[in-house]
Image (spheres, rainbow, N blue to C red):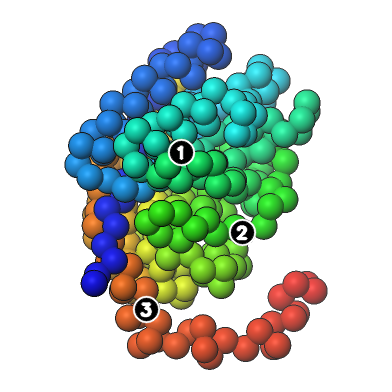
Amino acid sequence: MPRVVKCGLIQATHACGTDEPLDTIREANLAKHIPLIEKAAGEGVQIICMQEVFTGPYFCAEQTTRWYEATERIPDGPTTRLMQELAQRHNMVIIVPIYEEDSPGVYYNTAAVIDADGTYLGKYRKNHIPHCAPGFWEKFYFKPGNLGYPVFRTKYADIGVYICYDRHFPEGARALGLNGAEIVFNPSATVAGLSEYLWKLEQPAHAVANAYFVGAINRVGHEQPWDIGEFYGQSYFCDPRGQFVANGSREKTELVTAELDLDKVREVRNVWQFYRDRRPETYGGLVEL
């Protein structure tokens, strides 16, 4: 019997002014996303993912300690608890990308993973942290991840998470495949310009090289007062052959959905024997350089 899973991605504009109180900012963005989660539930979506640090703007456009107060604990913070309630209510797996406080002064760019019964399964912490102009000052905010490349065995599929800048590094994408991922979600915040042409190149390449599905999510719009560029949306799903199966628009807040036939993972791996033909004993130099 085919293993078909309906998945969803939410791309959205920031919900309010960035000068509002931090609690107001979080609540406004949650209020924007919850109806889209409800819409997804009504359409039969079984796994859904939001964009990078979805409860706020992309604040890494500046360097100020104000945003440290936007952190939350995982799983004990308010957003994770709320998403656990929604997951249980809708029998839906939810990937929750937020700004995490591990301890005072130790903060991560993290995605919590919640199973369809509301159980907190664990989290992925972004491993590759950029710090470059214009406006991607992430090392000011995030410590590099320390949890490796976990794969979460959810009710519907075995899923991995790779966050934004991670997508430029094939090593972690491979590790997720080796760890058993059938779908990898990449919540992002990326603007038009230097890397836009890579947006629909790198991740389909990861999907092909590792024979899994990829769901890529990017926010939309211009965020003031920084306006580091246009967050160009275009969230999408691609299959293990690198073919696009659903695409979002460039400009609007929306839910992007696709039905993913997980049997295609085995089918493609039986044709392209990349896992069989790997030569890990020859790759030692990669971690010595």
Choose top left, top right, bottom left or bottom right for residue 105: top right
Tell me which numbered mark, 1 or 3, is placed earlier along the sequence: 1
Amino acid on which disc 1 is placed: Gly
Quick check: 65 left or right of 179? right
Instruction: Identify the disc placed on residue 149.
Output: 2
Callout 1 crowding tier (Cα within 10 Å): few <14, some 14–19, many ≥20: many
Q: What residue is rendered at 36% in x and 19% in y?
A: 31
C-alpha distance separating marks 1 and 2: 22 Å
Residue 39 in sight in this render: yes
Rendered position, 85 above or below 10: above
Amino acid on which disc 3 is placed: Arg
Q: What residue is rendered at 34% in x and 23% in y?
A: 32
Quick check: 253 left or right of 188? left
Callout 3 crowding tier (Cα within 10 Å): few <14, some 14–19, many ≥20: some
Rendered position, 97 above or below 266: above
The residue identified by callout 1 is: 118
Mark 2 or mark 3: which is in front?
A: 3
Comparing 183 with 203, the one in front is 183
Comparing 144 with 267, the one in front is 267
The residue identified by callout 3 is: 266
C-alpha distance separating marks 1 and 3: 29 Å
